[in-house]
Amino acid sequence: MSEPDDPNRFERVDWDEIDRSGRLHTPTRTAFIVAMVLFAALYALESSNVISLGWRLELLDWVILLGVAVLLSLVVVPAVRQRDLTLRVLGRLVSRPIHAAAVGFLAVLSFVAVVGPIIVGSPELAFQHRFHAPYGFTSEAGWHADCLGTMTAGEGVTRYCEGSLTYPLGTDHRGHPLGHLLIEGARIALYVLVFTAAFVVPLAAIVGILAGFRGGRIDDLLMGYVDIQLCIPAIVVFFIGYMYWNVSLLLLLVMFGLFSWGGIARLVRSETLQRREDGYVLVARSLGASPLYIAKRHIVPNITNTLIPAVFHLLALLVLVEAGVAFLGFHHIELYSWGSTIQEGLDPPLTGIGFVMDPHEIWWVSTFPAIALTLTLASLKLVGDGLRDALDPRRTH
Amino acid sequence: MTDHSTDRSRSPAVQPDHDTQSDAAGDRAAVPDDSHPLLEVENLETHFPITRGLLRREVGRVRAVDGVSFEIRDGEAFGLVGESGSGKTTTALSALRLEEPTGGEIRFDGDSIMSLSGADLRAFRRRAQLVVQDPNEAFNPRLTIGQAVAEPLALHGMDDADRRQAIVTDLLERVGLSADDVDRYPHEFSGGEKQRIAIARALVLNPDLIVADEPTSALDGRVQSDVLALLDELRREFDIAVLFISHDIDVVRRFCDRIGVMYLGEIVEQGPTDEVLEAPAHPYTRTLLGSVPSLDPSDRELVRPLTDTIPDPSDPPSGCRFHTRCPELIPPEDVDLDRELWQTIAAFRFTLQADELPAAIEPDAGTTAVDEATVRETFGLPSDIPDERVDRGVDDAVDAIVRGDLEVARDRLAEAIPTVCERSTPSDGTDCERPVRCHRYDPSVDAEPLSWP
């Protein structure tokens, strides 16, 4: 215990000297504003054609860039500020091998999705190299004009072309290397993840917390809207949009994003309703804490047990939905989603024009993206569960 | 630690409502002849609307607090006792401006708290603190104890994290925990330890008032005493006023200087603790004291409430709110019955009214034939009552019950035994040295207070 005249005793604090600074500029808010200003400046520069950035960005890319800026300032900056906590949570997250593997896979996926397209560029048509088998496997030589590997003789006139290291994972019917397609698919999956995490999840959380915390008419209104929204299948709205506008990934993200947050909002609301009566919320209110502060510090951290798995479930769901819609063929033709690649690999009469072949004869075209998709979904679910456990100090591994 | 009190006595002239003092320790000075109490609650009303439908039309009101007045002076411990549902907690939360009162006024240090804003409101938020009932939900499970106790400091603008840490560590040691505990999470502590930490959190801003909402009801015996002793010691050392909410009359007896007894949103009796508990004036206070287990069962006869159901606060009884349960219900002027018989008949009436019928005569319970004898036996009613009008009323009511027509039975009894307690609302009686809301203390009503053994 300290000496009675130690200034660091509670009764020695002179509260008149301590001015409650407005503290409007927290690092998080500063980072958010800086990120938004930079983003706006970049957009203005690019669209005004004064200075060329050297590459052309689509609207989709801008939206995703905005999402990255949001995530950086709202997630990464606070995480870096609370380094100790972040490191402890990460340590707990990777303490189980399966969760560590899942985290590793998602990290590799994100890295490949960002860096891959820059290195390999856009895939180009190379019909002369189509249906090359992966390294170590063979394909019928007649399918492609130009066999890069060794030719081996089969029965009768049939000859086989062995896969080569030029295309270690083989090629599809356009001669696109599968590795290349996987990278493109990873980029699209990452777009879905960024869009959902940056726009859909905060929307759901804000609506849920607002409804739960304020109650009354606001609650009735918001939850009434959510009920209506939950009755409208997103895919129908997407197809309506598909009829009238250009098909694009952005349309899919916006439609499915806008129509899929209701469940999480309800979940957050009911959790908030429970938490807001808790003693610590009452004490924080009696201390004059603002509703925003209470939501951030006391509500959100305490609903992670349900929120985090639900969010990761939604992320996985939307990745799967994107793949599914692309599988059905309603995707932008220049975007090589895993879903569309799987479909092309399963439908050789359509894609392998002029040849008679079974899907299993070109198994690599559908199998590799299917594996990538499966691993992504499984990793998302695992990381969701792992993160929930890691965030809860009461759980011990 | 003793220097604090000397500090205070050195500067008795400083008025507590001046926030410009430079002496940090003597932030406020207890002035014996202070012109106004620290907390004044005047006619506080907190009604909660019951709404229905999309437009939230108001269809009724729960009168959680209905005209409560009391005051707390510097350094004084004021206890509010009453059963659950009596409005104690709502009163406490209203006093902290956590519930919006629908009427009345609450003044802290002379200023109405509802009109505070800006720096004044922040000062109020700093000077009045809350300790909640359940230690298990008093702390955010995701924050360490150190963070939780430092939160008030941070919220009130102390940006220096090292200083916060130093103050919190020191304070935790002074309430009986160790410095290493700051990095542990709430679930690692016992209930008693958590309540000590909760007290530390309420103390860290050096408040003038602590509102403690049943701070020990979730704890058991020994721990309860320890926590109470700690709170009492701190209160005396730092001269903090305490608004102490409890349903446990023994705890209040040990801790409080003065108490107010609450029933259905009203304070029925208030005064110095020993006076109120030694010579309880209001029948409700007497039943509360009577509910403390006694070794002699005959002791309790006088103070047993007529019925056990607390009436619905959205539809409180007319007149005196306690009349439906009051063992000292005032009989009609022209009725002269033996006290015990009168109680039996009143219990019969209000049991019927509260719809608390014993299974033996419950018409829906499937027992086919309810005869007159059963009904009389169940309620202990004699076959002949020495007052003609009452006798007729009881006879009719018993007949109506036998027919299964409870509505008629209720009406007949209400007609036969009217009481002033039901008709008019008592004001704080003058026939007692302290405010007591009972007709027996009203000189204009022809009924004398009963003596307390």
Image: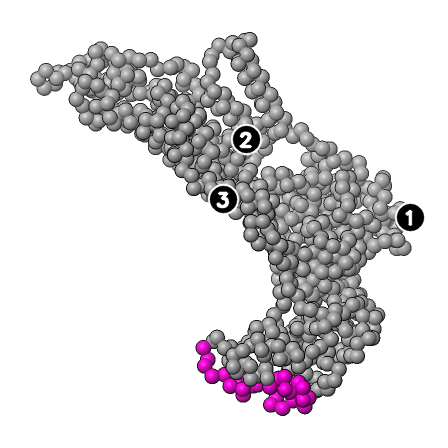
**Marks 1 and 2 on same chain:** no
Give the image location of residue A378, x and y in percent: 38, 35
Name the residue: 58% across, 49% down.
Answer: B55
Badge 1 amino acid = Ala
Q: Secondary structure at mark 2?
A: helix
Name the residue: 62% across, 65% down.
Answer: B312
- Dot 3: few (<14), some (14–19), or many (≥20) neighbours within 10 Å? many
Q: Could you tell me if the residues under marks 1 and 2 are in contact, i.e. CB atoms within 8 Å?
A: no
Give the image location of residue B259, x and y in percent: 76, 63
Q: Is residue B30 left or right of residue A194?
A: right
Q: Tag 3, which chain?
A: A
Give the image location of residue A289, x and y in percent: 67, 41
Mark linked to residue A267: 3
* Separation of marks 1 and 3 at Cα, in angstroms: 57 Å
Which quadrant would residue A99 be assigned to in this image?
top left
Observer-nearest of A224 and B154: A224
Image colouring: one colour
First reached walking from the N terminus: tag 2 or tag 3: 2
Residue A300 in view: yes
Observer-nearest of A88 and A288: A288
The vertical placement of A386 against B305, above or below, is: above
Give the residues in magenta. Answer: B366-395
* Separation of marks 1 and 2 at Cα, in angstroms: 53 Å
- Dot 2: few (<14), some (14–19), or many (≥20) neighbours within 10 Å? few
The vertical placement of A9 against B326, above or below, is: above
Residue B380 in view: no
Residue tagged by mark 1? B13
Residue tagged by mark 2? A75
- Dot 1: few (<14), some (14–19), or many (≥20) neighbours within 10 Å? few
Q: In the image, is residue B412 part of the stretch drawn in magenta? A: no
Badge 3 amino acid = Leu
Instruction: Nearest to the eye among marks 1 and 3: give it.
Output: 3
